[in-house]
């Protein structure tokens, strides 16, 4: 048990979660680590979520809970920022209202964060699939290192060694504040962008392979939102990656950013084709992506990029008509 018992702010956005909010709050109440506050941010939810939360507060007055009310609906990014701004803890933990946490979650992560003096402590995420009624590991930690330091943090992010989701991480609040790390207004599904920003700034991160989060997969889960609006959102995120690449002076970071951009382009195109299958829209997005950072001839002649990255980049940057046809052929064969 750590001696000083730092305060942990648990941030929970509230919007259309009346089916799940009580289970979420009960999981926080059962935590073995008791020095926490709960920050509920009401983003003008139209259902009974806030009434359920207020009733929970009345029945559990020993808990330190506050509700922040937005005057108008502002979206998840501003809702997360409101939670950060309202937090007074030494650490911040983000928990989505349809998910829940094991009773030792905060204890595991706070002990890890304090022991290693890390800016961010990361646990394992389990997914409960409500349709199949089964649990499975999701967004797994793929490194055996207990801690990662310095520029190797951003490198491990680019290489996909740990989950990029904003929840299920214990962030040192001073690290978030001093580096002015915030979610970007009017963007959703921006876990990748949030992590892209903070992974460049962190001095040390730490891992536990103990499960500290249960992602509840259901028909309304954001993971199933696959419309053109979503893909325009992903292209905006690519735009932010590209802007950061252009402004960065560090050559090693620029190399890593270029690799991340190429991988993210591929991911977006694959998901788009799997869900929408519109040839003209695919062609349009390939053409738009070709204006973003890509490998140069010098990059192809160097050993800084893998053969796989060079191959992806090649197919992304041949004439858009041909690129779209080859993409469909490669995907459908």
Image (cartoon, helix red, strand yellow):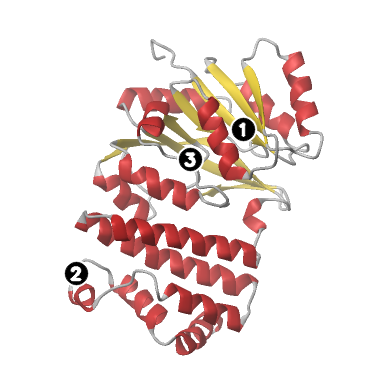
Residue 162 seen:
no
According to the picture, the residue beneath numbered tag 3 turns out to be 124
Mark 2 or 1: the one toward you:
1
Seen in the picture, residue 192 relative to 41 is either above or below; the reply is: below
Q: Position of residue 185 (x, y in %)?
A: 54, 47
Question: Disc 2 and disc 1: Cα gap in Å?
Answer: 44 Å
Element under disc 3 = strand
Q: Earlier in the sequence, mark 2 or mark 3?
A: 3
- The mark found on residue 303 in the picture is 2
Instruction: For label 3, count other residues whose C-alpha is less than 10 Å away and answer few (under 14), some (14-19) or many (20+).
Output: many
- Whole-percent x and y of residue 130? 72, 48
Vertically, is 191 above or below 22?
below
Q: Is residue 203 left or right of residue 212?
A: left
Residue designated by label 1: 12
On the picture, is 95 further left or further right than 318? right
Nearer mark to the viewer, of 2 and 3:
2
Residue at x 66%, y 65% (from the top left corner): 227
C-alpha separation, residue under disc 2 versus residue under disc 3? 33 Å
Viewed as shown, does residue 319 lie left or right of 248?
right
Foreground of the two, 33 or 76:
76
- Residue at image location 36% in from the left, 36% down from the top: 179
* Residue closer to the observer: 71 or 105: 71
Position above or below: 145 against 235: above
Between the residue at mark 1 and the residue at mark 3, the CA separation in whole angstroms equals: 19 Å
Which structural element holds mark 2? loop
């Amino acid at each position: 048990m750590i001696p000083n018992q730092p305060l942990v702010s648990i941030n929970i956005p509230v919007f259309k979660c009346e089916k799940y909010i009580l289970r979420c709050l009960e999981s926080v109440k059962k935590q073995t680590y008791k020095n926490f506050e709960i920050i509920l941010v009401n983003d003008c939810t139209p259902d009974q979520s806030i009434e359920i939360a207020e009733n929970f507060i009345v029945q559990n007055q020993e808990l330190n809970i506050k509700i922040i009310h937005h005057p108008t609906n502002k979206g998840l990014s501003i809702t997360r920022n409101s939670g950060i701004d309202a937090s007074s803890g030494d650490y911040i933990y983000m928990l989505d209202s349809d998910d829940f946490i094991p009773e030792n979650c905060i204890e595991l992560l706070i002990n890890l964060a304090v022991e290693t003096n890390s800016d961010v402590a990361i646990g394992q995420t389990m997914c409960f699939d409500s349709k199949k009624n089964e649990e499975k590991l999701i967004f797994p930690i793929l490194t055996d290192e207990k801690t990662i330091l310095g520029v190797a943090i951003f490198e491990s992010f680019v290489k996909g060694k740990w989950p990029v989701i904003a929840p299920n991480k214990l962030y040192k609040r001073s690290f978030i504040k001093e580096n002015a790390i915030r979610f970007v207004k009017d963007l959703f599904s921006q876990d990748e962008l949030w992590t892209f920003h903070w992974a460049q700034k962190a001095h040390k991160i730490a891992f536990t392979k103990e499960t500290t989060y249960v992602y509840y997969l259901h028909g309304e889960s954001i993971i199933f939102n696959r419309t053109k609006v979503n893909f325009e959102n992903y292209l905006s995120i690519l735009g932010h990656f590209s802007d950061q690449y252009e402004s960065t002076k560090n050559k090693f970071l620029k190399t890593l950013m270029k690799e991340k951009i190429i991988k993210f382009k591929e991911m977006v195109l694959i998901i788009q084709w799997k869900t929408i299958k519109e040839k003209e829209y695919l062609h349009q997005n390939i053409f738009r992506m070709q204006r973003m950072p890509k490998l140069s001839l010098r990059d192809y002649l160097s050993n800084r990029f893998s053969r796989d990255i060079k191959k992806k980049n090649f197919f992304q940057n041949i004439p858009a008509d041909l690129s779209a046809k080859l993409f469909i052929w490669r995907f459908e064969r």
